[in-house]
Image: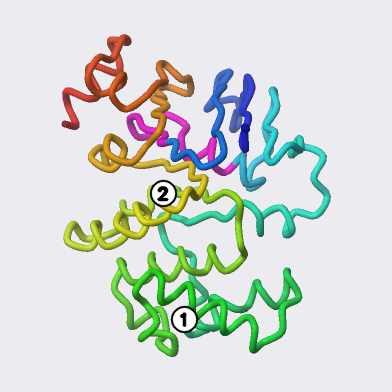
Amino acid sequence: MAMIEVKNVAKSFDGLSVLKGISFEVNKGEVVCLIGPSGSGKSTMLRCINLLEDIDEGSIVVLGQDISNISDINGFRSKVGMVFQQFNLFSNMNVIGNCTIAQKRVLKIDEETAKKKAMMHLEHVGMADFANAFPSTLSGGQKQRVAIARALCMDPEILLFDEPTSALDPEMVDEVLNVMKDLSAQDMTMLVVTHEMGFARDVADKIVFMDGGVVTEQGSPAEIFNNPKNERTRQFLKRVL
């Protein structure tokens, strides 16, 4: 079952074409990695799926609904969680507050239930001991694990990750990737923009390679990494592997 269907999506900023007829699908329980050079449109594609940008042409169907017809954006985002490169935690709230505010405001969950659920997910990502800490006291890897817990608190059906490790020191990358591997083992549907080729090769069900605003190639990790058909894909992988 397709959870995300992207068909011929185009997007321009100030006359500059960033997405040029992008098409791919993410099925239930799949991990799909968007890879490619910087500036190829990967993050813009993710932002379009989460209604942070409007598309110019084509269609995006998420959970069976064309997102151009969505009226309850907060309700939609509770089902389609997003984990950002720069964490986007609320600096004026402690960790538990970051993980309960949307539960209370969007899902209308009471304080006690919201805290219980937050602690369960903080435990899951190894951050339960930091429930009362403020983001300014946490490392990058810890902030990102809190951001993942916060997204999980909304009981999402899909998680979008926008380069979740690119702002981290190298030694902190693994702690975030390990959480993501655990989620994939639990059949969480995930669309991940990443430069972590080891993660893409080991965890993804499907790789979508983007360059210059187009999908030049897509397939299984074995197909893309071992036998890329497109010359641009070959050049990119040769450089990053």
From this viewpoint, which residue is outermost toward the front? 186
Q: Residue at x 40, y 21 (%)?
A: 219
Q: Is residue 240 above or below residue 133?
A: above
In the rendered structure, the answer to whether residue 62 lies left or right of residue 213 reads right
Q: Residue 177 appears at what percent x and percent y?
A: 30, 54
Q: Residue 9 appears at what percent x and percent y?
A: 62, 24
Q: In this view, does 173 lie above or below 70?
A: below
Which stretch appears magenta? 33-47
Label 2's element?
A: helix
Q: Which residue is drawn at 70% across and 33% down?
A: 61
Asked where in the image residue 238 lies, by quadrant, the reply is top left
Camera-nearest residue between 105 and 42? 105
Using the image, tell me which numbered label, if any, was put on residue 184. Answer: 2
Q: Is residue 45 magenta?
A: yes
Q: Does the magenta stretch include residue 210?
A: no
Under mark 1, the amino acid is Val
Q: Which residue is drawn at 64% across and 22% down?
A: 7
Q: Residue 114 appears at what percent x and percent y?
A: 62, 80
Asked if the residue at tag 2 contacts the one at tag 1, i.e. Cβ–Cβ closer than 8 Å, the answer is: no
Label 1's element?
A: helix
Asked where in the image residue 130 lies, by quadrant, the reply is bottom left
- Dot 1 surroundings within 10 Å: few (below 14), some, or many (20 or more)? many
Q: Which residue is drawn at 48% across and 41% down?
A: 191
Camera-nearest residue between 196 and 220? 220
Q: In this view, does 34 lie above or below 220?
A: below
Q: Mark 1 points at which residue?
A: 95
Q: Residue 236 appears at what percent x and percent y?
A: 25, 23
The CA span between labels 1 and 2 is 24 Å
| First of labels 1, 2 by sequence position | 1
Camera-nearest residue between 104 and 68? 104
In the rendered structure, the answer to whether residue 144 lies left or right of residue 88 reads left
